Amino acid sequence: MASPKPESLVALEQLRLDDARALLGRDSTLALPASVEYALPYLQQVIDGLCELSLKDPLTGLSNRRHFRAVLDRTIDMVARSGEPALLLMVDIDHFKVVNDTHGHLAGDLVLQAVAQALAKCVRTMDTVARYGGEEFAVVLPNCQAFFGIAVAERIRQTIEDMQVPQPLGQALNVSVSIGGAYAPEWIRSTAALWTERADLQLYRAKNEGRNRVVLDTQAEIFVSAEEKNMLFGHLALGEPAWIEAASGEASANATAQRAN
């Protein structure tokens, strides 16, 4: 008769990365289930749990910045190979410092968690929502046509404007967000930094134009930067600048034609 499955020896939600290093350092003294039948599944569970913890923001449960950057890189690669449109949204809570200063950091944490839940509910399972830092969030939407992108961004803005965030010792709070978005250049090998910079620029526009609004670039507005041209044509740019300039213009024209189709 098989021995009963042992209780979990590690509470994964309480583990920290230095706890993981300590476990690895102990090596042979690590307590494992007596039955070999359960030893490997148990270790795999610990590894899977640690991997998940390393990719999650502990306060909101969303993807953290490390996972966000990995998703951006994969999406850029997909856009460069297939020309499939992809949208990056940067979402910032308006006047968040006022919430912290007036109601305290516990209220601020509850607002962050409520916004995170709203974001997750407004997107598809294939999309990635991450806490970018502080009160700023990021949403990566692969295979996202222009009409769908603006609809999702407006749905996020409206959902957060309409919600009330309960407070343990006071009246529920209302908050709003500003949203900026940028499409990745199609058929072009870009970088995570350039794409994020473009989305941030639109976010600044949303803030400057009064907050609680959405500002997205259009695919027709996208230009190819010098860095992206260099990544596209590589060392050829050093030898034949006139030819490269012509080829770059042709690539931009092809990208525009692809978007028009």
Image (spheres, rainbow, N blue to C red):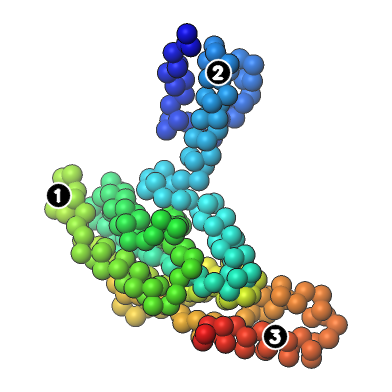
Numbered disc total: 3
Inter-mark Cα distance, 2 to 3 = 60 Å
The residue identified by callout 3 is: 248
Relative to 54, does residue 233 appear above or below in the rendering?
A: below
Q: Is residue 258 visible?
A: yes
Return the x and y of residue 11 as percentages of the image width and height.
43, 26
> Quadrant location of residue 151?
bottom left
Kindly identify the amino acid type of the residue bearing the numbered disc 1.
Gly
Inter-mark Cα distance, 3 to 1 = 59 Å
Q: Residue at x 45, y 17 (%)?
A: 5
Instruction: Please identify the residue farthest to the front as the structure is shown.
Output: 1
Q: Is residue 178 left or right of residue 31?
A: left
Front label number (3 vs 1)? 3
Q: Is residue 211 visible?
A: no
The residue identified by callout 1 is: 170
Relative to 201, does residue 47 appear above or below in the rendering?
A: above
Q: Residue at x 44, y 13 (%)?
A: 4
**Other-residue count near label 3 (Cα within 10 Å), few / some / many at <14 / 14–19 / ≥20:** some
Relative to 164, does residue 209 appear above or below in the rendering?
A: below
Label 2 secondary element: helix
Inter-mark Cα distance, 2 to 1 = 53 Å
Disc assigned to residue 37: 2
Instruction: Please identify the residue farthest to the right as the structure is shown.
Output: 239
Which of 208/38 is in front? 38
